[in-house]
Amino acid sequence: MTIVIDNYRANRVHFNFSFFQSFYLMKRVRCPKCDHFIVFDETKYQPGQSLVFQCPECNKQFGIRMGTSILLDKNQKTTLHTPKNDSDNDGQEEMPTVGTIVVIENVFHYKQEIPLTMGDNVIGRYQKGNPINCPIETVDPSVDMTHCVINVSRDKRGRLKFVLRDGPSYTGTFVDNEILGDRERRVIEDGTLFTIGATSIILRTNNED
C-alpha cells in the first residue's frame, strides 16, 4: 500500500509535529530536487510500506520504502545511504562495491550506510554540487565537505586493503582516539571505528576470512 503525504493537506495524514519532544522517534527525508527536509514519525508505518512525499517548497513528489530509509532513486544501490552527487552521470558504468562505511546516528543525522569502491573514496558533508563520491547527509558543522579519504586497493595476495588519510580537514580524522598526521596513511580493517568531527563511522569490508 502506498500513502501519499502532502504537508498542506492535514486530512490525508495527520502528523504530530512535537518532534522536539520525541526527536529520536522522528525521521526526515530530503527532497532530491531542492534539498528541503521533511520530518515524519516512522513509528506510524510498517516496514516495507511505501510512502510518497510532496515537497512543500518545490512540489516535487518522491518516494521512500519504510525499513530501508532510502530515496527511491534509480542510481542508489544500497540501503540507508545518501543520494549520489549531482555530478554523477547516468551513463557511467557502476563500480562494484567492495565495502561500506556505517555512519552512526547522532543528533546531527540518522544512520547511513555508504558504499565504497576501488580507488579513492572521498568522505565529507553533503552539499549540493560538492563533487565527492561518499557524501554524508549531516548538519554536523565539524565535518568538512572534503574531510577524509579511504583508498581501496588489493595487496599481493589479492585481498582488499583499506587505507585512511585525512582530507586535510579543519578538525582532523581520529582512529582509536588518535588523530592522523597530515601525511599519515593508516591501514584500517573490518570493524575499525574512526571519527570525523562529532561523527563516528565503522568500516565494513567485503574481505572473506
Image (cartoon, grey):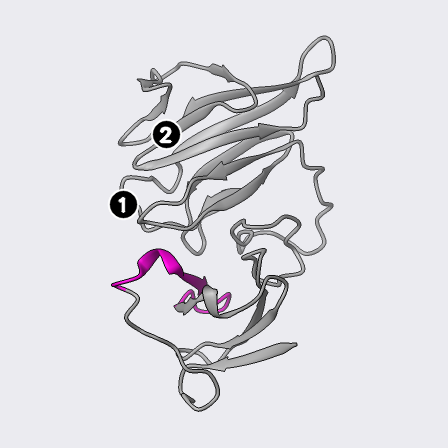
At a point 44% along the width and 26% down the height, the residue shown is 193
Q: Identity of the amino acid at label 2?
A: Thr
119 versus 180 height, above or below: below
Quarter residue 62 falls in: bottom right
92 versus 101 height, above or below: below
| Viewer-closest of 42 and 65 | 42
Categorize mark 1 by other alpha carbons within 10 Å: few (<14), some (14-19), many (20+): few
Secondary structure type for disc 1:
loop
Residue 74 point in image, percent of width and height: 67, 60
Mark carried by residue 195: 2
Q: CA distance from mark 2 to mark 1?
A: 14 Å
Q: Which region of the structure is painted magenta? A: 20-37
Residues at circles 2 and 1 in contact by the CB criterion of under 8 Å: no
At a point 54% along the width and 43% down the height, the residue shown is 113
Residue 23 point in image, percent of width and height: 32, 59
| Viewer-closest of 3 and 88 | 3
Name the image quarter holding the N terminus: bottom right
At a point 54% along the width and 57% down the height, the residue shown is 69
Quarter residue 22 falls in: bottom left
| Viewer-closest of 135 and 203 | 203
Q: Mark 1 sits on what residue? A: 141
Residue 19 point in image, percent of width and height: 30, 66
